[in-house]
Amino acid sequence: MSRILRTTALGVSACCFLAVAVKPDAISARAKKLHFSSIVVDTHDDTTQRFLDGKFDLGARHTDGSIDIPRMREGGLHAIFFSIWIPSKITGQEAVNRALAQIAAVREQVRAHPQDLVLATTAAEVRAAHKQGRIAALMGVEGGHMINSDLDVLRHFASLGVRYMTLTHSGNDEWADSSTDTPAHHGLTDFGKQVVREMNRLGIIVDISHVSDKTFNDALEVSNAPMMASHSSCRVLCDAPRNLTDQMMKDLAAKGGVIQINYHVGFLSQEFRNAEKANPEINKAIGQEVQKRCGGDEACQLLEGDRLTREYVERGELPRVDWKKIVEHVDHAVKVAGINHVGLGSDFDGANMPYGMEDASKLPKITDALLTKGYSEDDVKKILGENTLRVMAEVERVSRERSKQPQK
């Protein structure tokens, strides 16, 4: 979830651009065949916030937001990690309870759409879902504050199907430093290191999107399983603290991990980021208007913040960012980390999408662009999902081995 960069000071979320129901853009026949035969995995989507009022039907085509079953089908999205997200400022038992409510809401959407969705917790189950023609629904907790410094809560999340946890969100938690907060722990505390070890034992992927560079290094040292950055991009192309440096990508890859590229315009485009910094009153005005329209309704914030942001783009007060920036970041990450260590983590429904990638129906364009750049079909498959599935399988293997050891 990337909207935090826009509105941290205001406590308001800005999100993904208003999407319209359109047919997929024209792509080559080769790209279409490859895309729809591959397993396409998106490791980070914030659509969960829309589930909470009980009225949102994932099975219906919507004219707003980025994710629903018709558009996932249209864009060949075969596996999706729904984010379980609570603002960092919400802590304690309330954070735990709200996380559990979101987990229940994801499971309810799966229950309501058995012909289209299946809950998946392993790489093998994702592959089985693909063979059945169903979309694999997975879950990732976005922020370690939701375990309330209690390993039993982490274990409970695992039992309910959570398969990754981002160690922090926008603010530090009690045991780890965030990339967008003042350091308080010098990385991971001793308890934070216990969390990482327990995640290895449980088969929960350690997600280092949102963490400080020191927390990243600590987690890399402690984890016995590959880690991933579920929704981060390349810092050398866009200097945001949420993005990874080239060295971080190399180190992540050296231990078998994957960086999944985030589509948020503020992580893709240095021009957009510079414009935000140069015009802080724009973000302030957007935040105030979103608060006025939505109050504490986070699903409303996701939609209204984006509508307002696009208005500023259309007036020329913020730069227009094209979807091809995603491919630039993918290509750079491949050159730095290697073809086996790059994937896709859109941040759909939780960030500002570039023009041309407003929703899941647009995903085949990425496949087409990669083929046009000269990537082989096997390499494109790795980026689309195979690299993520490999990490899942390896984390599962480590979990099986660790579970045989005495629990501390």
Image (cartoon, rainbow, N blue to C red):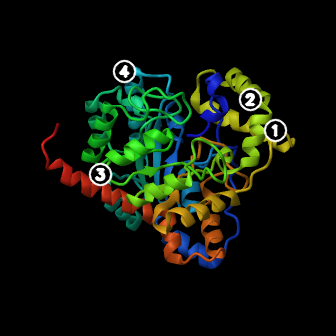
Depth check, mark 3 against mark 1: the one in front is 3
What whole-number distance in Å separates the C-alpha atoms at marks 1 and 2?
A: 9 Å
Q: Is tag 1's residue or tag 4's residue first in the polypeptide sequence? A: 4
Secondary structure found at label 3 = loop
Badge 4 marks a residue whose secondary structure is helix
List the residue tagged with mark 2.
Answer: 286
Q: Which residue is mark 4?
A: 93
Label 2 near label 1: C-beta < 8 Å?
A: yes
First in sequence: mark 1 or mark 2?
2
Q: Position of residue 237 (x, y in %)?
A: 66, 53
On screen, residue 9 above or below 67:
above
Give how far across and how far down residue 246 sits, in percent.
Answer: 55, 55
N-terminal of the two: label 2 or label 4? 4
Numbered badge on residue 312: 1
Q: Residues within 10 Å of mark 3 (few under 14, many from 20)?
A: some
Give the foreground label among 3 and 2. 3
Q: Are marks 1 and 4 in contact (CB under 8 Å)?
A: no
